[in-house]
Amino acid sequence: MPMPSCDVLVIGGGLNGLACATRLAQTGRKVTLVEAEPETGGATRALPDLAKGVKAPALAHLLWHLDPRVEKAMTLDRHGLAWAARDIATTVLSPLGPLTVTGAQTSGPDAMAWNRLYSRLTRMAERLEPFRRMAPPRLGGGNDWLALARHALGLRLLGAREFRDLLRLVLINAHDVATDELTDPRLRALLCFDATLGAWASPRNPNTLILWLDRLAGQVAGRKQSLSLPKGGLPALAAAMTAAARAAGVTIRTGARVARIDIAADRADGVTLQTGEMLSARIVVSAIGPKPTLLNLVGARHLDAGLVTRLRHQKARGATAKLHLALSAAPDFGTDLRARLLIAPDEQAVDLAFNPVKYGETPAAPVMELLLSSAFEPGHAPEGQHVLSANVQFAPHAPKDAFSAKTSLLAAAMAQLERAAPGIGALVTASDFLMPQDIEARFGMAGGSWHHGDLSVEQMLFLRPLPELSRYATPVAGLWLTGAGTHPGGLSGAAGWNAAEAIERAGA
Amino acid sequence: MIYDAVILGAGHNGLVTACYLARAGLSVCVVEKNGWIGGAAVSRELTPGFTYSNCSYVSSLFRPEIMRDLELPKHGLQILPYEGGAVFMENGDTLGMFRDHDANRREFARHSPRDAEAYDIYARDVLRHCRFIRPMLLRTPPDPARFRPRDLAELAWLGRQLTGQSERQIAEMIRFWTMSISDYLDHYFESPVIKAYLAVSAIIGTALGPMSPGSAYVLLHHYMGDVDGNIGAWGFARGGMGAITAALAASLRAAGGEIRVSAGVETILVQNGRAVGATLSNGDEVRAQRVISNMDVKRTMLTHVAEAELPADYLASVKKFKTRGSSGKLNIALDAAPVFPALPEGSPALKGDLHFTDSIERMERAYDDWKSGHFSADPFQDVMIPTMIDPTMAPPGKHFMSCFVQYAPPKIEGRDWTDADRDAFGQTCLDQIERHAPGFKDRVLHVEIRTPRELEAEVGLTEGNIFQGELTFDQLLFNRPVPGYAQYRTPIRDLWICGASTHPGGGVMGAPGRNAAAEILRDMRLAPKDMSDAYAVL
Amino acid sequence: MTATSLHRQPLAETPFHPRTSALNRLHNWGAWAGYRTAGCYGDTVMEHTAIRNAASLYDITPMIKYRITGPDAAAYLDRLTVRNVSNLAEKAVHYTAWTDDAGQMMDDGTLFRLGPQDFRLCCQERHLPWLRDSAWGFDVVIADETESVAALALQGPTSAAVLRACGFDIDGLKPFRMAEFAFAETNLLISRTGFTGDLGYELWIPPAQALALWDHLMMQGAPFGLMPVGSDAVMLARTEAGFLTANLDFIPAQQALREDRSRSPLELGLGWMVDWNKGPFTGRRALLAERETGGRWALVGLDIPGNVSAEGAILYHRKTAEAGFITAACWSPTLKRNLALAQVQARHADCRDLWVEIYALRELQYVKLMLPVRATPRPFFAPERRRATPPPAF
């Protein structure tokens, strides 16, 4: 057998792959990262230009979380990461008029109630946050008991009242909390929207509030609950992390699509690229998602049948479509464009938009999250022009009729936009609309799910992606998982960092 | 006289509590607003010659320990296992259910050979979850936020229950408790009609659809009972569900307890922070050392206790307690048995549950209607004809048919139900049956239509919720009904709650009533008498 | 319509039912996998004697039969089962087992290689979901052919002679091999396999020709003492041979309600069939780990003093600490020994100082016996004639 060409081979150059590769390189390993696309960045990579001079933001257009460990160890500021906007406000567009919310602050009749609720839930979220920065606890033992006890104590130190409240709220639905605590339909809509953003769930589903708590646990560059936009958009974050990875000694090969993970003598010992080229490595880490990694690159033959079945049944249901529009001029939403705009009049609208998706159909009135990155800084579109990116909810991952689903959802989204900003349709010079299956095709995400598999309670923490895969190791010796499909999901880099830590601990 | 205990409401849980207290030597009085007893476990003759189980209609969850302790069989209770069942499909076919394992397998195999075999694996897996949960039913939940020895000991017990299983099984259990029944069934089955049939127990009485996470737990809630050790089996109470409460009442009287009907509570009397009795609708006042409410927590606290007596936090939590009703009921007197052409004459299916919903999608769409404040246009119905087995409920050859219906909202588009709404609801249900049993409507002698409005008005279930509170995790175990007050106590000293609002919830189980009695006796430092240990799960 | 017919007749009948029902003098029927099958035709002792002395005919149609075909069939079965299927020759059969991911027994059975890409898997329990799920990623088709193949077990010293008299030349047929013969305008498949430990064959035929085959065998077999036998006699024969039966000697993993009830093939003494070098198969990682750390249980064959069958008895170490339990036991009329299969805790696999507590029912009173047991190798009964090729006449 030839000498391995590297110690670690990382598949997938998204943020988690980059974070994982960097940490492993920083601890003295020889790391090669292979990325199938011409650019690294995964969900944050720049899409091809929509129109001349118009840079469509990537699939992800805002940052909720950036793992502080990743940020610090990768010295991203030194690799060019700067911020176009921090603490970005959210403006809920509504027939009642727009309502702007920045963290706990808002106006209107519910300003106080919102502040109380937001602060209370933020306190809980902050106690849950440490669990994001560790491998999920194991149910059968073998835990870092000290860290676990510390985090558990942190929860208990909320005080009896809030601890009880947490136990009540942890699996509750977002809708009931919104209607119990708030009267302003716009705030209810905001809570319900953010609890189900990127999820296959109605806000009336139990287990949705925790998704909002997860968002509230976020921090970016030293600020908690700070919705942020990097200078140059999210592709710039990918660029900074790529530069940091290179600086740490990671060899990055783009345009290198892996055809299979090679297994010899019960161990993963490298990969074969689609070109036929073989790269050998002592260990292989895949950030492209548990399903494609194990089902496609490893293959059923090397895995136990039960695991394959459980993996096939793992839910990966993207329910968010992505709309990009190049606009010849600023649209008129009747509010400051330097905010995240939500088209969601009330909590029921969010729920109703989900109903048809359950049956593979599309909503007549989707709810939407809009960002005009060109409003925050120049460079995203030619002077005077704009680029709008929208998350359109909800979209079926397995439509009964794919073609008509796409055309009808696009028409419905445009109609929603037209109602919110009359005349916007006439400003559109170019557009791009991705249904979940288009997202799967373009980004390789199973089911078009942002998290490479639903981020839902039954697939969270020690259940993510499956109980037997939850500690980043796989049954195939030498093969590890990271990426959004592993705990804690998302593109904060935490999964990459945790996986690297698990690999180090295993002495691999 | 001052009773040792007055119990507000003669539902099954109130009567269970009363029986145990009376047997322990306490002087007990049960007051009931209606002219009859039973709450939601009731048999009534609304048309001559026919006995309706006009709320709950089948029994499985009622704890056998209670039947034995309180000698209910001696007082007339008899549970009849039932056989068969069928789902009538839109395409004219049926899915039949049989007590014989292999007959059932061969019938399922007509719809999917794979699913027919998967059913055994599924049943095994669900039974594992049942075995885990059953020992919890007759125990008081711990308060995880307190450090009293009893709470720590109970938490440790729970921990041992959990860690007594493999890591894999714990993970399976947590997944099961948090999933939707639709997702759960997708792991096992491919046939829409088989999935629809199996999803039924996950939506009965629930303000959730089969695609809502947490609905798998509701299924477990309906599976964890048994008929003579046959876990998951259901049966009829001979003489209707009122036979359960009638036997309880007889047992109570035999133990020296007293029951007053047409004596609804008006106000729970509180003096110096202690409950001392209640004023009644008939003008009486009962005085007692302790007051035990069988009403749900909302009705108890928001209607019958002066707001000033309750801490603001507690009051706020009670108001947040979710009691959205989701079910309606039709009770029908039939001149003759209905004829379903899809079933051959004499089919055993008629001696079991009949459904007309052949896909999860139809169930979920029925739930979508509920969310929008409408009764389902294409409702799910669980239809039973108890008189196919029970000779006591209708004249020979005639039948009582019980139709349990999902979904019916507590309000129609935010306003109260009208009689016209109710009748339209009833018509929708009758039409659905008629489609599968032509001529059925001609055999109808009498119909009682019950929406959440009627359930609330007659039985006192707030918003018509049949479980006295929804069965989602935020309202289960130590969260039920109010975190910090899950041990049958309330902020008012000597005011207790013993109904289905408390752990382990509804379903004609009797467990809340027994657990409350155990807590009360414990509080009085009295040893419970005739309270057998929960049957071991071997 | 099905709903009623299934109610009136929950048990199906095999294609041989018109003959077996006529012969069943006692109308002693039992349920086997949803079929009505004879427990005993008239006299279990005489039926068992036929198995060991002459020839017996046993309706094994209810045996679950899965047909596995396709280009990946062999690769699929290599991944499914613990034995090496690539090495299984065409027209050969092997006894095999398969496990779940945790290396716990799903079932055992016999695998027939009918062609290069064509297999039949026969087993006691149903496994279609597992077989289908395991097929993901393989180009195979899996069908349940239980109802479309009728089967008979022809077992006993004169069974070869019966077949010869029927006109089937089985002289060259070795154990665990099969051959096809033309019969009644169809193909009759005869395999030299069985569940009695004796010389014997199993015959596989389409249901339409089942009765013709039965009649032919019974007529030609009469001079050789052929008689139909029921399950009671066959179970006695299998116990004295020392063969395992699912749900009697082990619980299939997918049926185990209590997690600790399942067993690995190593714990059941089937380690010999595991091919560790053939590449990945389901359960391999778990079994490798178990091979390192050792299992919890061991399946042993026991010789027990006296002549009281130890069915259902518990085993004790030093007469005090529970150490295991009997799964099958009989007084063997053939071997004149009191035999048993038992599961014992792994540390007692050598059976030293193990005692069996037998409750012998004698005229309504139980007599308690505490007897020392001795490990004895399996199979308990393996006569020369079982393997001889060509097979002897008796």
Image: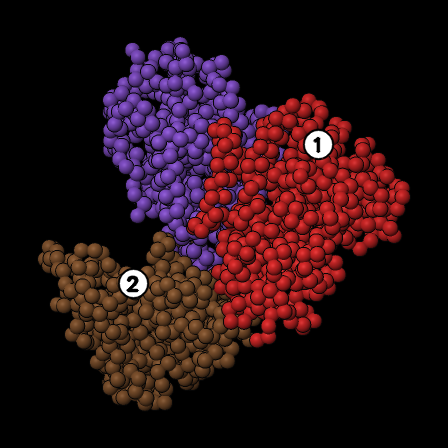
Q: Is residue B290 visible?
A: yes
Q: Residue B249: x, y in percent? A: 31, 26
The residue at which mark 2 appears reads as C346
Give the letter of the chain under mark 1. A
The residue at which mark 1 appears reads as A102
Hue used for the chain lettered B: purple
Q: Is residue C310 visible?
A: no
Q: Which residue is more in the foreground, A264 or B347? A: A264
Q: Secondary structure at mark 2?
A: helix
The amino acid type of the residue labelled 1 equals Thr
Q: On the rendered image, what quadrant is the C terminus of chain A found in?
A: bottom right
Hue used for the chain lettered A: red
Q: On the rendered image, what quadrant is the N terminus of chain A found in?
A: bottom right
Q: Which chain is brown?
A: C
Please give the name of the residue rendered at 39% of the width and 42% of the height, measured from the top-left corner.
B159
Q: Is residue C125 left or right of residue B381?
A: left
Q: Which residue is more in the foreground, C172 or A417? A: A417
Q: Residue B131: x, y in percent? A: 37, 46
Give the letter of the chain under mark 2. C
Please give the name of the residue rendered at 30% of the width and 17% of the height, measured from the top-left corner.
B4
Please give the name of the residue rendered at 48% of the width and 34% of the height, measured from the top-left corner.
A156
